[in-house]
Amino acid sequence: MDVLILGILFVFVFAPAFGSARFAARSAPNGRHARMLRVPLGRGSALSAFNLAVLVYVAWWTHEDRHYDDFAAGTTILLAVTSASVLFLGLGPLISWLLGVLVRRTVRLPPLMRLAVRDLADNRARSAAAVAMTMVLTAMAVIVTTVAVAMAAQDGARYLPQGRPGALLVEVYSVEEAAAVRAAVQRELPGVPMVRSFRAGAWHFIPDVEKVDLPDLEAVSPAGVIGEGELLRYLTGDPATPYDGNTAVVVTSDDVRADTVTISYGPLETDALSSRSVPAIVVRPTDPEVKELFIPAKVIRDLGYQPRLDKLIIDPSVHRTSRAEQERIDRRLDDTATTYVERGFEASTGWYPIVAVVIVTALGVALSVTGRGGPRTTRVLLRLGGGSAAAPRLFAACRAGIGTACGAAAGTVAGCVVGLLLAWPFTAPIEWEPVPRVSFGTPWLSIAALPPVLSLLAALIAALAPVPSKEGASGRRLFGNRNVMAG
């Protein structure tokens, strides 16, 4: 799985970054005053516009809250991600054009900043490549953040709790291991009572609630749960809930009424099933998320079958299991059972390291490539310094900060657009009964802070970096010439 994630990350993040950088370098003019090559600019613009149109179409096609089969969902995601990659590939020449526009708008800037911009434009091929890579990497960080937040919100809307909040559920694999599992849990939680939940066993068991005035077909779990009185009281959250071994209970907070439950049953090797109806009542739980059909174990035994232990449950109103206790129980069970503590929906944070790596890589690219000046720039810089040893560091900070700002700002804008479009196919429902899309809180403040923060970091690191010895020697020879750069 890790290899697959790294492969996807390389193909859809670093591959377009390298491609965009190469396209930007090849389309850059030779000098500051040379005209921008129109053919690469036109091709890149057309390529980006076409793939943006594809992304808009995919977002429109997947915007409906309907079932998308696995093949359709996978195909649209692949098409969308590929289009996003090619879109950023086409933005490479636009970066070269942006640097040319920027150098013509620097008349009112301070001399050091004007020199930094002109240095970027004088070495347009190298600078455009670095800025293009910074742009793509920043955009990918924004896209991953936006899509991850959208998917987390949709997963939260689809989340169905497996028990009451704080309950410990221990799923038993086999009847032979049930006694050992129960003993292991008791050793870790001595004196804590356990609620038993049963399953039907190796036979057909199909309960059906005969609904009267039931507007919500998902008001209860169709499979039902089997147990004794303590299981019913666990479901309702009320220790005073009456228990009748001959009456089924619909546990739901919805406004429903149920008269009877029909149970179809029979051996697995036959389709000719028998049926029996048992009376049913509706009980409201203290937790509105609980929606279950409770079947008394006595009803199953009266049918001539012995229910099998399915789960051991620790009622949270009696004892709330901590993470440390769950870990100790897991070690003691040694793969003979599975434990789960219902803590509600917990969004995945696995995308945090990916975003961090991409951002750090973007910062490193901006520093490593845009952090050098040519001999002509060094001579002019020394004239500007007026004998100040801080001038080379200030120039390096300006150059790194401006180059990073150009790439990060363009990447942030492009990443917001593409990320919001990709959120639709990535949240397309594949369930037969889809959950409607929910709004998600995009961290706009963090995204907006990305360009200035990256620029300041790049400027700070460049200012603190050691000055090359060759520039230092030139400074000792030329400092003292206080002429100021003309133009």
Image (spheres, helix red, strand yellow):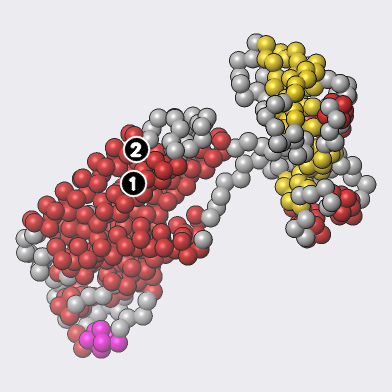
In the foreground, 482 or 408? 408
**Magenta highlight on residue 77:** no
Residue 452, image quadrant:
bottom left
What range of the chain is rendered magenta?
Answer: 469-475
Mark yes or no: residue 344 visible.
yes
- The reply to whether the C-beta atoms of the residues labelled 1 and 2 are less than 8 Å apart is yes
Mark yes or no: residue 105 visible.
no
Q: Which residue is mark 1?
A: 80
Going from N to C along the chain, the mark reached first, 1 or 2, is 2
Disc 2 residue type? Ala
Query: In the figure, 291 relative to 422: above or below?
Result: above
Disc 1 residue type? Ala
Residue under the point 33% across and 34% down: 60
Does dot 2 land on a helix, a strand or a loop?
A: helix
Q: Which residue is mark 2?
A: 59
Does dot 1 land on a helix, a strand or a loop?
A: helix
The x, y position of residue 64, in whole percent, is 40, 30
